[in-house]
């Protein structure tokens, strides 16, 4: 039996700031994983990846990351994606800083 | 200190100007990322987990106060107010924005610094003993030779596309503080029977996924033969080194697969050809560099203020005992400033701290600062009489932690908090170990103990040569930490032995605690260090301390 498809989000780093960003359903880049389009179909995931790779003047290093459903939207599956979504653990820099500032 | 010539200054400026244009072309879309990536890497710019990272070379770990202040300015203006000093005597800025990097590089050029060849398959920043020019056991200051190698290797047309990166370390002392045996080429200054200084040349050391201790390819190399001989090694490697497999491309694998004797024969043959092409210009040039590294004039000062403080102030005494080393000149000392305050990120200094260290170097330290591969900062020439004042000012800046060489003086790579290659975090593990042993108040009783932590198999945290090494891995989607014991990065270099299965993130600090308590129980005398106790008793009692409790829990 084929392995069930793990849902995905399209993620990358912003070209200018390097910040981790996620592709939303309406084709914008959001710094919040919760805003990402959660893709549960493999063929659609590949198309969305290709869409994102076309936007080389906005982002770098596009890939599909595993994600799961939650009430706040997609959430990370692997711990690496947790750190990407939250920022470093030694300082409240990056996304944590922005969240604190708001 | 070496000062840039007009040629050096123009060369660095030109590279900045080129990179400025390349960044502009990347932003306006005329360069793709595939085209741009090798260009940014040539200039030390990485894309990490959360942001870009700019790696700046600190050649042979030497900085002037003006350079340190410029790093502080850069940290405040374009980063988040701090810099991270690394195990290869570089400084990394973790949050630059792409469009700001050319300005950062221009600001570095203003003080004779650059980020050239801090990445890519080139000859990287040449590192040296951080006590160079000050150590009591030194034959000669190794930095002039390191500077010569820097100039020779920078933009060397033959060596811009090596099979893999190439790292050289130099020491002028028999006590190896530069981990020369874990470098692609390690140079240890020795004397020939007539007393003339030269080098023992070590090749093929390296950590990473296939850790190897370097081997001696030439027992004695006259100083004047250095460049042609090094050039011969790199040229032979450039042809023999594997380009089919990134993991087998370092010279350590070439040495291993070719055999040392065969490699030596090839190098000697190449050397004979190349030596004939060197007409002595390099030696004239070296003499000019050496003149710029003339030792500072050290004034004799009365020792009474030092003696009084040492007797009267236990905090000062403790700091002197751990952080101050013997200087070659009587009445002077080498000060190590710990960037490992308990709970702080190893190797990080704020802009304010950088300025304090620059001020101290200016007021008391003959304008010299060093960065050690152990991620601390050194004031190499301080009169003992000035130590109380230095200590007081360090204390006020949160820089007087008395822990050099102790359990909380941990090397840690950036790990998964920053690095795109990491498989687990290192920094919080270091923070938690330091905090835990500070709370236990056992640090000074435990004595010399080097813990080194890497967040992936590439071993930037030198875990293989830690007395206790910790390697963070991803095991089935869970952060897992493997322990090695008995590693040693000195002239007696040894790769540590793995203890067994790894520990989860929340179990690694208790595991280290069990190891240390086992050591305290089994050491023969309070003077027997962890490493000596390990050498005497072997792995078994430490393994039992690590795993028996788990076996009990499981039963």
Image (cartoon, coloured by chain):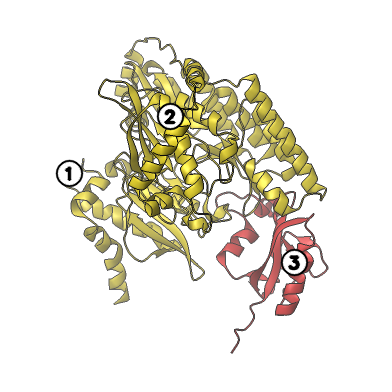
**Badges 2 and 1, same chain:** yes
Count of residue discs: 3
Rendered hue of chain A is red
Q: Mark 1 points at which residue?
A: B525
Which chain does tag 2 point to?
B
Q: Is residue B205 left or right of residue B235?
A: left
Of tags 2 and 3, the one toward the viewer is 2
Judge whether residue B33 can be spotted in this image. Answer: yes
Secondary structure under the numbered disc 2 in the rendered image: helix
Above/below status of A50 relative to B115: below
Mark sitting on residue B276: none
Q: What is the x, y in percent for residue B233?
A: 44, 40
Q: In this view, does A57 lie to the left or right of B123?
A: right
Residue occupying the point 82% across, 66% down: A27
Q: What is the x, y in percent for residue B363?
A: 50, 17
Above/below status of A25 relative to B284: below
Rendered hue of chain B is yellow
Is disc 3 surrounded by few (<14), some (14 to 19) or many (20+) residues within 10 Å? some
Judged from this view, the residue extending furthest toward the left is B524
Q: Name the residue under label 2.
A: B226
Residue occupying the point 70% across, 39% down: B101
Q: Nearer the viewer, residue B317 or B184?
A: B184
């Amino acid at each position: 039996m084929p392995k069930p498809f793990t849902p995905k989000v399209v993620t990358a780093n912003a070209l200018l700031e390097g910040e981790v960003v996620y592709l939303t359903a309406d084709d914008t880049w959001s710094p919040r994983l919760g805003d990402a389009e959660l893709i549960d179909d493999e063929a659609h995931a590949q198309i969305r990846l290709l869409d994102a790779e076309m936007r080389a003047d906005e982002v770098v290093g596009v890939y599909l990351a595993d994600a799961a459903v939650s009430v706040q939207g997609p959430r990370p599956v692997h711990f690496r994606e947790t750190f990407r979504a939250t920022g470093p653990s030694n300082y409240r820099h990056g996304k944590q800083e922005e969240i604190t500032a708001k | 200190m070496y000062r840039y010539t007009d040629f050096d200054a123009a060369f660095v400026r030109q590279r900045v100007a080129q990179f400025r244009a390349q960044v502009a072309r990347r932003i306006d879309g005329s360069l793709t990322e595939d085209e741009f990536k090798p260009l940014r890497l040539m200039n030390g710019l990485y894309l990490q987990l959360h942001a870009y990272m700019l790696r700046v070379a600190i050649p042979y770990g030497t900085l002037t106060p003006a350079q340190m202040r410029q790093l502080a300015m850069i940290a405040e203006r374009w980063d988040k107010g701090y810099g991270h000093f690394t195990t290869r005597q570089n400084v990394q800025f973790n949050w630059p924005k792409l469009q700001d990097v050319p300005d950062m590089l221009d600001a570095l050029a203003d003080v004779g610094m650059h980020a050239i060849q801090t990445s890519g398959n080139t000859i990287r920043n040449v590192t040296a003993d951080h006590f160079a020019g000050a150590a009591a056991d030194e034959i000669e200051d190794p930095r002039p030779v390191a500077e010569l190698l820097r100039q020779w290797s920078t933009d060397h047309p033959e060596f811009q596309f090596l099979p893999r990166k190439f790292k050289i370390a130099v020491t002028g002392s028999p006590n190896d503080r530069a981990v020369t045996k874990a470098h692609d080429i390690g140079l240890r200054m020795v004397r020939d029977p007539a007393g003339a200084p030269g080098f023992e040349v070590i090749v093929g050391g390296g950590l990473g996924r296939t850790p190897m201790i370097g081997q001696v390819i030439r027992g004695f190399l006259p100083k004047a033969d250095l460049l042609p001989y090094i050039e011969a090694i790199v040229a032979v490697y450039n042809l023999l080194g594997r380009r089919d497999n990134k993991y087998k491309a370092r010279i350590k694998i070439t040495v291993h697969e070719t055999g040392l004797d065969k490699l030596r024969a090839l190098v000697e043959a190449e050397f004979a050809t190349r030596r004939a092409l060197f007409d002595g210009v390099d030696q004239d040039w070296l003499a000019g560099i050496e003149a710029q590294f003339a030792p500072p004039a050290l004034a004799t000062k009365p020792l009474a203020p030092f003696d009084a403080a040492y007797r009267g102030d236990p905090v000062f005494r403790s700091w002197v005992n751990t952080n101050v080393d013997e200087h070659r000149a009587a009445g002077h000392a080498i000060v190590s400033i710990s960037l490992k305050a308990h709970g702080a990120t190893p190797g990080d200094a704020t802009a304010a701290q950088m300025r304090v260290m620059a001020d101290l170097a200016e007021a008391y330290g003959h304008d010299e600062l060093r960065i050690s591969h152990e991620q601390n900062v050194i004031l190499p020439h301080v009169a003992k009489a000035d130590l109380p004042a230095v200590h007081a000012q360090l204390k006020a800046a949160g820089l007087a932690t008395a822990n050099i060489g102790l359990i909380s003086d941990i090397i840690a790579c950036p790990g998964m908090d920053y690095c795109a290659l990491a498989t687990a975090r290192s920094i919080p593990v270091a923070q938690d170990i330091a905090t835990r042993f500070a709370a236990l108040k056992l640090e000074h009783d435990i004595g010399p103990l080097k813990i080194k932590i890497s967040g992936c198999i590439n071993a930037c945290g030198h875990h293989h040569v830690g007395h206790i090494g910790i390697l963070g891995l991803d095991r089935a989607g869970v952060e897992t930490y493997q322990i090695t014991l008995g590693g040693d990065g000195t002239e007696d270099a040894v790769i540590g032995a793995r203890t067994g299965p790894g520990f989860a993130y929340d179990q690694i600090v208790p595991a280290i605690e069990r190891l240390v308590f086992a050591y305290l129980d089994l050491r023969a005398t309070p003077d027997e260090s962890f490493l000596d106790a390990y050498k005497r008793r072997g792995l078994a009692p430490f393994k039992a301390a690590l795993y028996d409790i788990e076996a009990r829990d499981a039963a």
